[in-house]
Image (spheres, helix red, strand yellow):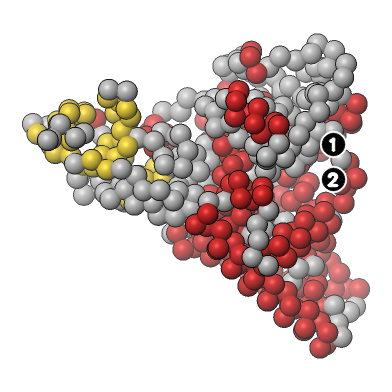
Amino acid sequence: MSQWVEACAVDDVEEEDLIRFDHDGRTFAIYRSPDDAFYATDGLCTHEHVHLADGLVMDHIIECPKHNGRFDYRTGEAKGAPVCVNLRTYPVKVEDGRVLIDLS
Amino acid sequence: MAAAKRDYSLVGPNARRAVETGLASAEWYHTDVPRKEMKALMKRSDGPAIRDTVLWLGSMIVLAGVAVYLFPSAWSVPFFLAYGVLYGSAADSRWHECGHGTAFKTRWMNDAVYQIASFMMMRNPVTWRWSHARHHTDTVIVGRDPEIAVMRPPDLARLALNFFGIIDVWHAAVDLARNASGRLSPEEATFIPEQEQPKAIRIARIWVAIYAATGLAATATGSILPFLLIGGPRLYGAWHHVMTGLLQHGGLADDVTDHRLNSRTVYMNPISRFIYWNMNYHVEHHMFPMVPYHALPQLHELIKHDLPAPNRSILDGYREMVPAFLRQLRYEDYYVVRALPATAKPYRAEFHEVEPDLAPAQ
């Protein structure tokens, strides 16, 4: 069963960037791609306890700020050392200028 | 006062203590930088690194060509020495920056230069990628950081030998032989994930083949020339990267979570900065490892109000560091505390409890 949660406004995230979103004791990352699509993943790198929100978005890649581990934030795929474990992703939709993610 | 004995093993009591006390994988101090400015600094480009790589490898080819042409005349020596520094020292910073993946925007360029530089530095590119990740997670945390260059009390003879790469090359040869035989050390196994371990072994075997071919060439020609070009420069050209590398953390605090306390920024001349790829901005690099080497001077300008004043030169850095080493021979717990400017956020007291009689004048 879907559990849509409002994460932020569309304008809160710049193109080719991300923000951190905390909810119910969990932390997520909300991305806006260069082609203006929104995505969501877990907020912490799978390598170590580091918030991805301080990292760098390049096209569809998020690079962790601590060790430069890279993920494709659309699929969560880990793109090589030092990250080996994929990032969990969440469905996203935009309604009335708000970004919602499905935490079910 | 009895000095506390440190155990630098990654599987020893200090390692366990670091985990128990929360020093391992801790939250570190960062200077506040607005997201927009940090994004601009982190932005990748290929231009500076392509320029520098063409200059680096192009110079090596020219210098090696002249050196070989003049060999065995004594006139070849300065050309070999210059070639050696580009091989045995400049490769260190290329290994480092490309390992971070920040030097180039294009991934394959980072990877290609990383492989070349790793070979020159005799650092298994798999092993050392993971060891350097740990170095950034747990910078100078005893028992956690596998890249502590100067352990306490300092082994000065070892440091002196390493200016000629002797200790490093010996360890590299032992590691290479072990990895090529299909084995990893227990310490390597602590930071290299299982799925990455076969890669480390495969690369070690390729390198053994290259060195064997170099040896065959030397035997066939009855000349040491092949080893002056391959492998040898890791010895006779190492001095510059050791000279600059010791300044990174030497004589400063350990077991703290503030890079301002355990890392050193040093202003350097342009040639050293080219060889070192701006890693003289070392506090800045550790605080924000996503910032490429070519943007570190801008980052320094942006955050220097929150950092200790840099050392004014390499010599100035050694004037601070060497007396600290000498004092650590008798007082293992001694370290240099670098003064913060009035504009900086203070060090956190819990990590900054200096014995009054051990604290240096500032």
Disc 2 and disc 1 in contact, CB within 8 angstroms = yes
Image check: B112 left or right of B81?
left
The image shows residue B334, relative to residue A39, as above or below, that is: above
Q: Which residue bears the numbered disc 1?
A: B154
Q: Is residue B96 visible?
A: no
Q: Residue at x 53, y 54 (%)?
A: B194
Q: Nearer the viewer, residue B302 or B27?
A: B27
The image shows residue B268, relative to residue B307, as above or below, that is: below
Q: At numbered mark 1, what does the secondary structure look like: helix, strand or loop?
A: loop
- Percent from the top left, x then y, of residue B310? 68, 30
Q: Which residue bears the numbered disc 2?
A: B159
Q: Residue at x 68, y 67 (%)?
A: B181
- Percent from the top left, x then y, of residue B215? 78, 79
- Which quadrant of the structure image shows residue A29? top left
- Percent from the top left, x then y, of residue B362? 78, 18
Q: Is residue B195 visible?
A: yes
- Which quadrant of the structure image shows residue B11? top right
Image check: B263 left or right of B166?
left
